[in-house]
Image: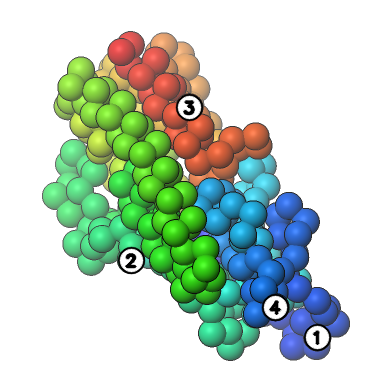
Amino acid sequence: MKKRSLPTLIALPAAAALVLSGCATSSDGGSADAADGGAISVVTSTNVYGDIAKTVGGDLVDVTSIISDPSQDPHSYEADARTQLAVSKADVIVENGGGYDPFVDTMVDASGTDAAIVDAVDVSGLDPEAGHDDHADHDHAAFNEHVFYSLPSMAKLATAMADEFGRVDAANADTFTANAEAFGEKIADLEAQAAAIKTAHDGDSVAYTEPVPGYLFDAMGLVNVTPEAFSEAIEEGDDVSPAVLNETLTLFTDQKVDLLAYNEQTSSPETEQVEKAATDAGVAIVPVTELLPEGEDYVSWQQSNIDAISEALGT
């Protein structure tokens, strides 16, 4: 199954980038030039990674998140010259990888930057070639690129960021390492909560409109029973066949699942029908997102997800 990835970069005229000058602008309005002893310039594909970068780097990093608006559909993203300029001036670039955000690679290739690239999928140790076994009816489901819902993977990513930041700014390497370790301790607490849910609900059946929370469900021992053809069509932006849609709706009318995880950032007539079926059947709905909601950091965001799932399951 080919994952409907974040949008392909719109080609930029070379002259457009030349109109802009100065340092990359961060999500909080700062600017930096590490070569002059300023903050490390970091560009991330989404605000999820931007928040982790800021957690690890603190005031020593200047972060630009390419996609940061939680109301924005990532699949409609269009790059601009300012974003391309930020990439060209970055010291460190953080991407999801795994085919999720190919626009980052496109901009890196176009800019000729020598920035260090941190790929979350590579860092995770998960194998895209092996597939991700999160589907009850398929032994070799397609790889789930949403590794930002894999708690241990994000702890590893923070460590990788600290390593790269330390290479750019050796004088503060210990600070970056300490920050990453503190983040890892918070992640360990979230993992313990997920494990507790697994103890109570291992093997419970759940459904989702897209496999966004798949890794978190795995950690909780929850079994996704959504027809793969449904999730595949939604990810690809294709129509769902009547037979597959009916099979999916039956999950709720027949009370075969304990909750539905609904991706709030993308919707279609089919997902809206599924949401209505869950509501009508009294099946709990847990909203999930691919970007940080406003006012949340990574840890509080995942804490909210864990709390919502726990409540939905009646833990």
Disc with the residue nearer the chain's start (2 vs 4):
4
- Residue 196: image quadrant is top left
Q: Are marks 2 and 4 in contact (CB under 8 Å)?
A: no
For residue 252, which quarter of the picture? top left
Q: Which residue is mark 2?
A: 122
Image location (x, y in percent) of residue 152: 31, 47
The residue lying furthest to the right in this view is: 19
- Mark toward the viewer: 2 or 4: 4
- Decide: few, some or many residues near mark 4? Use Cα within 10 Å; few <14, some 14-19, many ≥20: few
Residue under pointer 3: 304
As drawn, which residue projects farthest toward the front?
A: 171
Q: Secondary structure at mark 4?
A: helix
The mark nearer the N terminus, 3 or 4, is 4
- Residue that numbered label 1 is attached to: 18
- Residue displayed at 47% across by 68% down: 166
Q: Is residue 204 above or below residue 178?
A: above
What amino acid is at disc 2?
Answer: Asp
Query: Which quarter of the image is occupied by the N terminus?
Result: bottom left
* Circle 3: residue type: Ser
- Mark 1 or mark 2, earlier in chain: 1
The amino acid pointed to by label 1 is: Leu
The crowd level at tag 2 (other Cα within 10 Å; few <14, some 14-19, many 20+) is: some
